[in-house]
Image (tube, helix red, strand yellow):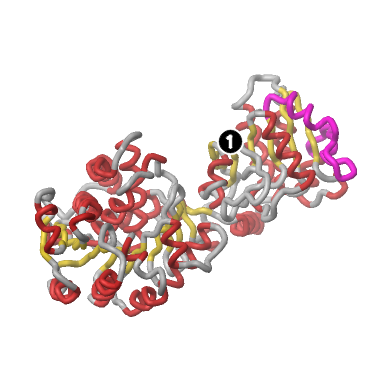
Amino acid sequence: MPPNFRRHAAALLSPVEMASADRLTIEGGVSGIDLMENAGQAVARAAAGLVSPGARILVLCGPGNNGGDGFIAARCLKASGHDIDLRLLASPDSLKGDAREAFRRMGLPHDRLLVNGRIAEDLAAAVNRADLIVDALFGAGLDRPLEGSLADIVIAVKASGRPVVAVDLPSGVNGADGSAAGQAIKATTSVTFFREKPGHLLYPGRALGGAIAVADIGIKAEVLDKIAPATFVNVPALWLDAWPQADPCGHKYSRGHALVFGGPVSATGAARLSAGAALRAGAGLVTLASPQGALMVNASHLTAVMLKKVADVDAISGMLDDRRFNAVLIGPGYGVGEAARAAVAALLKAGRAAVLDADALTSFSEDPAALFALVANGSGSTVLTPHEGEFARLFPDLAGGKLARARAAAERSGAIVVLKGADTVIAAPDGRAAINRNAPPWLATAGSGDVLAGIVAGLLAQSVPAFEAACQSVWLHGEAGRHAGPGLTAEDLAPALKPAIRALVERSGPA
C-alpha cells in the first residue's frame, strides 16, 4: 500500500485545491470537457434517482463551470426521457471555455433567469411546476453572499419545497469553510467531484448539503501528491496506522500510565469521568490525583482507577518524579484560578504529554500568552480541548470560519487544538487539520467533554502522537455516542467505547 494511500482517501480539498486537481489532470492529458462530461453525467444519475421517469426537472445554470456541469446534466436527463426546463443566469455569449462547449453540446432551449436585473416573472411558477430542481448556479467557489435577484432565486427554490440536487455544493455555501453569509439553497443531495470539500462538513454547510455523493470524474489520486492537502475528514483511514497495537507480550506498565488531576469535594465527578475514559481507551494504568478533602468521595466511586493524594503544587512536581506517569490531564472539575495556573505550569515543565481542558483553560483567559509560553517551553506534546466559549476567551481576536480559527490557534499556541462542537475541528501547529462528522447530537450533555479529554489522555499514555491521538479520540467519542444512543448521559460513554474500539482493533489487524 502506498504510504499516502490512507491520507489521500481522507483528504478534503478547498476550492483552490480542487482547481489544482483539475488543472493537473488536464495537464496530464485528460481534456477539461471530458471531466465536465463525467461530472454532468454523475449529476444526471443522482437527479434521475430521485424522480420517476418523465418527471419535470428545472435546471438552474450559472455562468461558470458549475453551469457547464448543469448543461451536461440537462442533456443527459432529456435523453433519458425527462421534461427539462433550463434557466441560464447569463447570456450564452458570455460563456467561456468548457462551459461554452457544454452549452453547445446541450442543444436545448432555455430561458434567461434574469431580465434587466430582475428575476423572470415566471420563475416562481417554473419552480413550482418542477418535480426536482438541479442547482448548478455557483457551487463550491462562491465566496460572497447572494443578494438581490440572486437571493430571490434562492428564496423561490426554498419556498417551493421541491427536492434539490446541488452541483458540488448548494449555491450560497462557501466550499472552503461551510459559511453562508446570505441566502443559500438547501439541497436534498449534493454531488461533488473527486474529494469532498471542507464546506460539506462544516456548519452551516453540512446542514444545507443533504446527502453527499462523491463522483469519480477521472482525476487520479496521484495528483494529491503534488497538491499535498492538509485538511482531512476525521475517519480511521487518516490515523489507523497510528492506532496502538496490543503487544501479546505486553503488560499494564507497557501500555502507559495516565495521571488525571481532580478538584474539590464539590466537583469530583468530572475528573472521575475522565479517568474512567482514559482507562477504557487503553491506558494500562490510570491514577486520579485528588486533594485530601475529596479522597473519601473519590475512593467510594473508584475501582480499577487508582487514587493518590496530592496536596499542592510541590506535591505535583514530586509526583511527576515518577517517570512512569507519561500522560497527564488537568481541568475537569479542578477549579479556576491561581492554583490551577500553577499546576498547569508544573505539569508542562515536567515534559509529559498533557491534555488541558475546562478549568485549566479558563484559568488563563486573562493572560492566554502565559499559557502559550508554558507550552512553548515544555518538552512534551500538549492538547487543548476548548469549546467555543473557552476558545473565545483564549483567542479573542481570531475571527472567520471554524477551520481557519482552529488552525490559527494551533499555530499560535504551539499545541494541538480540539475546537469542539457538532463539527469538531482538530488542528496541529504544522497546519494539519481534521474535521469530524460522526458526533450525534445527543453528545451535547454534561460531562461529555470530560470523557473526551480522558480518551485523549488514555491514547497519549499509549504513545500515540498527539494529533493522531486527538483525532482518534474525537472519532471514538462520536462512535461511543452512537452506540449509547439517544438519552445517553456521560456515564454511558466509557462503556460504549468498547464496541467502537473492538471495531478499530479488527480493522487494524491482529495483535
Residue sitting at 36 percent across and 59 percent down? 385
**Crowd tier of the residue under label 1, counting other residues whose Cα lies within 10 Å: few below 14, some 14–19, many 20 or above:** many
- Horizontal side of 117 relative to 366 (left or right) equals right
Tag 1: amino acid: Thr
Could you say where residue 232 lies in the image, as x and y percent from the top left?
47, 55
Q: Is residue 109 magenta?
A: yes
Could you say where residue 484 lies in the image, as x and y percent from the top left?
30, 37
Q: Which residues are magenta?
A: 105-132
Could you say where residue 215 lies in the image, as x and y percent from the top left?
57, 41
Depth check, front residue: 501 or 103: 501
Number of numbered discs visible in the structure rendering:
1
Residue 491 quadrant: top left
- Horizontal side of 423 relative to 220 (left or right) equals left
Residue sitting at 60 percent across and 26 percent down? 50
Q: Residue furthest top?
A: 53
Q: Is residue 458 visible?
A: yes
Residue on which the image places disc 1 = 189
Residue 78 quadrant: top right
- Horizontal side of 271 relative to 33 (left or right) equals left
- The answer to whether 424 is drawn above or below residue 104 in the figure is below
Could you say where residue 37 lies in the image, as x and y percent from the top left?
68, 41
Mark 1 secondary-structure assignment: strand
Residue sitting at 35 percent across and 59 percent down? 468
- The answer to whether 366 is drawn above or below residue 406 in the figure is below
Q: Is residue 146 magenta?
A: no
Depth check, front residue: 101 or 396: 396
Q: Is residue 28 visible?
A: no
- Horizontal side of 402 relative to 459 (left or right) equals right
- The answer to whether 235 is drawn above or below residue 307 in the figure is above
